[in-house]
Image (cartoon, rainbow, N blue to C red):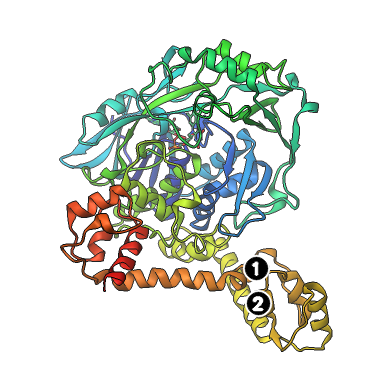
Amino acid sequence: MEYPDRFDVIVIGGGHAGTEAALASARMGCQTLLLTHNIETLGQMSCNPAIGGIGKSHLVKEIDALGGAMASATDLGGIQFRVLNARKGPAVRATRAQADRVRYKAAIRGMLENQPNLTLFQQAAGDLIVDGDTVRGVVTETGIRFRGETVVLATGTFLGGVIHIGLDRSRGGRAGDPPSNALAERLRALPFRVDRLKTGTPPRLDARSLDFSVLEEQPGDTPTPVMSFMGRRDQHPRQVSCHIAHTNERSHEIILANLDRSPMHSGVIEGVGPRYCPSIEDKVHRFADKASHQVFIEPEGLDTHELYPNGISTSLPFDVQLQVVRSIAGLENAHITRPGYAIEYDFFDPRDLRHSLETKFIHNLFFAGQINGTTGYEEAGAQGLLAGLNAARRAKGLEAWWPRRDEAYLGVLVDDLITLGTKEPYRMFTSRAEYRLLLREDNADLRLTETGRELGLVDDARWAAFATKREAIERESARLRASWVQPGSAAAEAVEARTGKALAREYSLLDLLKRPELGYGDVAGLAGQPVSDAAVAEQVQIQAKYQGYIDRQQDEIDRLKRHEATPLPTDLDYDRVEGLSHEIRQKLAAARPETLAQASRISGVTPAAVSILLIHLKKRR
Ligand code: FAD
């Protein structure tokens, strides 16, 4: 049958990409349908119930700055919060939260159900309605036809999903859920490049069968961090600790003795797995000299005894999993509640996408999440938001929008994917961004919320809170700039006591704040009234301390923009340009771009490479 209502945007898949896509489109005022296998699994975390961490929290905060759901759901569901790299510079600081799986999912579902313009429907999509080279809607596996202006596909690990436990195989989208085979076949018939990837998950454990007295406790931070710019500590449920255990030589012997029963190592799995999140058998095989690997024992929630042993993801047979788990100190009597497994699935080469995440071959069809070759909830959510917003803009007849690499990790993620493609599950790291000092997690709102407001993604409450914060930062910075400490004054004595150095002349409070030994709390009260909002104080401090570096990075960006018209000599020998990768040299030699701008648009030529070219040209002169 043909469903009577038409939609502006149809989103297929209620995972992390699909939910952000549907929410973004609906926030922008588009009539949106979220079509998913099962309403009970909206926002389900397939693997570890944790959000954020290095590189990933930057994406979560960017989603949040653009009005998305992930950070707020984390504040409502998070049971342990920590700031990683807290002693390092602000560019690499990252908030990580262990979430209660059930509470997180409930928070996402609540947001979806209460979002105006959004309709939920439970059923599997089996086909796309394609007219020439334009998508017009979706057909469910039972034959209901939904018409839409644009379609976002966010089906995660479900396309042609095959689950492996040892040498046993079964079809599935993840444990307990069916695969998407009809849709996978339909998509394979379209002109996209398709390949296989794999990922895995560890067995889960019953907390009552562990001896916690021999495990190292890892409590969350106090005061407890929040994930969302709108988040409040009092939204968090009760906080609990994680624990740390270790594999040992006996665990490794068991694994090595059974490698022939591993689907990865016996060649049964062909898909490539995540290099940065390897299975325990990969770790033991690849790092043979390491006698032990850490295992983080993380709670799955407040109302369950289930634990997630982070670090022993495996697809070894169940009997081997049990032996490995029980070889670990503190886990000798562990009961496994669910076996670990690996899953292989179809993904599409993201080089067949535009920056807007629209496919190049089928108009009005957008891809987001794991199907683009990424791994991780955060990477999926960020793409979902971008695809949903561009699907909505297309439905409204507006131009696409995406952030540049110097504006957001989301810009880095999409640019990497569509220009470089990926051969293994792609995850975000701070090292992927050239402009790390500009792209901090703490300033994601200052970078993106104003744009989000213009795009129609940011509601009045967030906009008002943001405007107040931005104004307070400007006011406080101006106050510190205009407040002076005179040598010999009581304020100067306080500074000298703290730094051990005499003040030779008068200094503004802002200049004093630039000193490494002094923090906002040391200087702000030396004249006048400090601000009480910790987020405002943090921004004022970071901006003061890092302004020099930030300005330099901004200059570099501006310089690159100015030099875009710079000609590249046709006889340039790219093999002699120091610092370029072999791959980029080959691409440049083959394409022979005439200007730096043309070079920068060649797939795989990064802004860092353009910078190197610029330096080389200057040396040649
Ligand atoms: P998903 O979260 O998979 O959501 C897809 C959604 O689409 C589901 O709701 C599904 O029901 C729905 N759907 C699928 N097909 C259809 C259809 N035809 N019609 C209607 N609805 C459909 N990430 C890491 O960062 N580290 C890890 O170690 C890690 N390990 C993992 C291990 C396993 C076993 C799995 C399954 C995933 C793992 N992940 C890991 C990946 C993480 O779960 C994903 O990156 C993330 O969930 C991707 O989000 P998504 O929205 O793209 O897809």
Q: Give me the residue at 72% from left, 89% from top.
A: 505
Dot 1, crowdedness within 10 Å: few (<14), some or many (≥20)? some
The quarter of the image holding the N terminus is top left
**Which of the two labelled residues, at mark 1 and mark 2, occupies the earlier sequence position?**
2
The quarter of the image holding the C terminus is bottom left
**Which structural element holds mark 1?**
helix
Residue 4: where, in percent of width, then height?
31, 38
Residue 508: where, in percent of width, then height?
68, 84
One can see residue 271 in this view: yes
Residue 575: where, in percent of width, then height?
26, 54
Dot 2, crowdedness within 10 Å: few (<14), some or many (≥20)? many
| Amino acid type shown at disc 1 | Val
Question: Mark 1: is the Cβ under 8 angstroms from ligand 1?
Answer: no
- For residue 526, what is the image quadrant? bottom right
Residue 617, relative to residue 166: is it above or below?
A: below
One can see residue 401 in this view: no
**Left or right: 240 in relation to 280:** right
**Which structural element holds mark 2?**
helix
Q: Give me the residue at 65% from left, 65% from top.
A: 538
Residue placed under numbered mark 2 in the picture = 476
* Foreground residue among 233 and 292: 292
**Left or right: 333 in relation to 410:** right
Q: Give me the residue at 30% from left, 27% from top.
A: 184
Pointer 1 with pointer 2, Cβ within 8 A: yes
Q: Give me the residue at 76% from left, 82% from top.
A: 528
How much space separates mark 1 and mark 2, taking CA atoms?
Answer: 8 Å
Residue placed under numbered mark 1 in the picture = 536
| Amino acid type shown at disc 2 | Glu
Residue 34, relative to residue 123: is it above or below?
A: below
